[in-house]
Image (cartoon, rainbow, N blue to C red):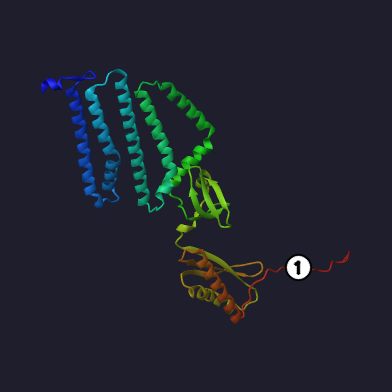
Amino acid sequence: MSELMGVEIAGRPLASYAAAIGIFLCGIGAAQVLKLALLRRRGSEAAGPEGLARRIVRALVLPAVYLGSLYAAVAVLSPPGKAGRVVNAVFLATLVWLLVRFSTMTLSVVLDRYLERGGREDGQRRLKPLLTVANLALWLIGTLFLLDNIGFKISSVVAGLGIGGITVALASQAILGDLFSYFVILFDRPFELGEFIATDDVAGTIEAIGIKTTKIRAATGEQVVVSNSRLIGGKLHNYKRMERRLVIFPVRVAYGVDPGKLAAIPAILREAVTAQEDTDFGRAHLKELGESGLNYEVVYTVTNADYLRYMDIQEAINLRIVEAFGREGIEFALPTRAIRMGRDQAPGR
């Protein structure tokens, strides 16, 4: 038996081939045992750290076990010269590929969990631009690492990338500003997809959030594309997150109304508001004596955030005020201006 194992094939003893095959078969066996353990627990697979661990094992650890066993088997044979270098390069390339995949998968899951904790249902769609940039950066780092370890001199390439990066950064400050603003939108969450916002010159529903721009469907129907830095840098109203709406509106009464009726007007205004559902009455006062009438001010809160509901309530209040004023004989003020004309005095008088 020992003589048989000492027989050489392609310059290697048969015992080396037997050891290589044994190592490879052991690796396959270990991978199969791990795979069966995962299949047995598939029914309990759920979101969370445990589910993430199983996905990583299935997608990355199993291929790594196969790769490691194959490399160990080939290493036992110690292929000479160029063949050995090719084997090392292939192994290293595969290892880098697995590590980059592991990094991108972990980053995607971690960020997705972060968004889910914040109540976002559109995590994958929101993360797509960020993950694209992160994946490109990770693959670039992995490629440079691989080239450096298989003998390429990449110091000049890295230096060139550094100088080029500075030049690009100086030439594209606006783009980088929009990119950083995208990160602010992603993590600070001033608005979400589907929410109605208003800025200084545009109001509409958020349709898409990109790395550089945000697309808004305006209330008039057209799509408006706004840079992220402009949205973050200016004043922004998010009406979707409004739970209560404070309403302040004036009522103008003509001069000449009986003082007794003037004193009763706040009660009339109060009744007009409290008669409506989804309202909290605040106050009603004679605010000032205006140029063409007496100015009352009414303050109340709508407890429903829907804009159409607010308009229905305000319309109902206005109709009740008109009806009550007509019944009491109270006139609304109209803009008026009195012009007095006098006869010029004759000269010398």
Left or right of 9 in this view: 224: right
Count of residue discs: 1
Residue 92 position within the rendered picture, expressed as x and y whole percent measured from the top left: 32, 28
Q: Determine the secondary structure under disc 1.
A: loop
Q: Nearer the viewer, residue 78 or 283?
A: 78
* x 23%, y 46%: residue: 38
Quadrant assignment, res 132: top left
Q: Position of residue 344 (x, y in %)?
A: 84, 66
Quadrant position of the N terminus in the picture = top left
Disc 1: CA contacts within 10 A as few (<14), some (14-19) or many (>=20): few
Above-or-below relation of 137 to 219:
above
Quick check: 204 above or below 84?
Answer: below
Front residue (pair 141, 248): 141
- What's the residue at 59%, 81% (across, down)? 327
Q: Position of residue 296 (x, y in %)?
A: 57, 69
- Residue 126: percent from left, percent from top: 43, 47
Which residue is farthest left? Answer: 1
Residue 188, visible in the rendered structure: no
Residue pointed to by mark 1:
339
Q: Residue at x 28, y 47 (%)?
A: 51
Front in this rendered view, residue 27 or 203: 27
Residue found at the far bottom of this picture:
327
Residue 315 visible to an observer of this rendering: yes
Task: Name which residue type carries label 1.
Answer: Ile
Residue 302 or 255: which is nearer the viewer?
302
Q: Quadrant of the C terminus?
A: bottom right
